[in-house]
């Protein structure tokens, strides 16, 4: 995970937010992050207006912040637990699925590409937890971790909105193939997720030798 090395700096930046939201508790924050992901997906699927992209981007920011803060709140409130970690990881997986599904089923992307992206990302998540199941540490390595996915989703939602506002949200690749920027994002997710999955598999294979 490329951004994982900045976690300590990010935690210091997020500490004031964690203190302000501590009364919600870590599980409350995790559930709130899931609600943001769900609302973003609903907007993208059912509201065909480009403004949905902008509002969804704001909800993605909220999802990422709440997800980052829940762990800090758990630590500073003394509520860290195995059950809490389970809740956090399950909600993260649901959030990933919901947000990618929302993009894939929107008017701004190709659902067929989205289906491949969903499958690829779920494999990455599975290999991360499988490492832990085999007695090793949970594997966050690779070029496409959750933090990277959230940042890329945010960036491409904003870019898609900007190009839609300019009236040019679809780009002709060939005479028979046209892609939106969100399609490009989904294609990147397919490639990067499978590379990340291969990296994690090789690392586990060597560790088990």
Image (cartoon, rainbow, N blue to C red):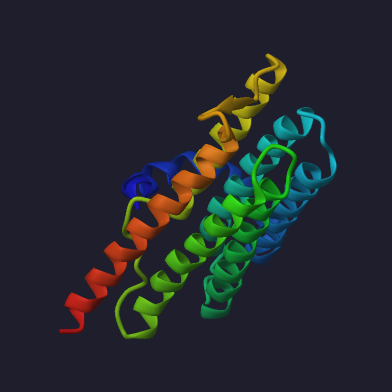
In-image side of 204 versus 89 (left or right): left
Residue 178 versus residue 98 in the image, above or below: above
Residue 107 versus residue 90 in the image, above or below: above
The picture quadrant where one finds residue 197 is bottom left
Of residues 97 and 34, the one nearer the viewer is 97
Of residues 190 and 72, the one nearer the viewer is 190
Residue 190 versus residue 49 in the image, above or below: below
Of residues 126 and 134, the one nearer the viewer is 126
For the question of whether residue 79 can be seen, the reply is: no
For the point 82% across and 36% down, which residue is it? Answer: 48
For the point 38% across and 48% down, which residue is it? Answer: 7
For the question of whether residue 141 can be seen, the reply is: yes
Of residues 82 and 101, the one nearer the viewer is 101
Q: Position of residue 133 (x, y in %)?
A: 39, 84
Q: Position of residue 78 (x, y in %)?
A: 54, 68
The total of numbered circles placed on residues is 0
């Amino acid at each position: 995970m490329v951004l994982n090395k900045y976690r300590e700096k990010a935690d210091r930046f997020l500490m004031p937010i964690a203190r302000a939201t501590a009364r919600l508790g870590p599980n409350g924050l995790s559930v709130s992050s899931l609600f943001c992901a769900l609302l973003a997906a609903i907007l993208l699927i059912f509201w065909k207006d480009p403004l949905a992209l902008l509002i969804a981007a704001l909800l993605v920011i909220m999802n990422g912040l709440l997800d980052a803060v829940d762990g800090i709140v758990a630590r500073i409130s003394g509520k860290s637990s195995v059950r809490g970690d389970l809740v956090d990881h399950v909600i993260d997986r649901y959030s990933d699925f919901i947000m990618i599904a929302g993009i894939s089923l929107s008017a701004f992307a190709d659902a067929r590409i989205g289906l491949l992206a969903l499958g690829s990302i779920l494999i990455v998540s599975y290999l991360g937890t499988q490492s832990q199941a085999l007695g090793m540490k949970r594997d966050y390595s690779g070029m496409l971790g959750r933090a990277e996915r959230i940042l890329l989703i945010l960036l491409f939602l904003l870019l898609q909105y900007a190009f839609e506002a300019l009236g040019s949200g679809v780009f002709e690749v060939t005479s028979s193939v046209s892609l939106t920027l969100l399609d490009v994002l989904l294609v990147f997710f397919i490639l990067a997720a499978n590379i990340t999955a291969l990296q994690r598999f090789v690392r586990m294979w060597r560790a088990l030798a």
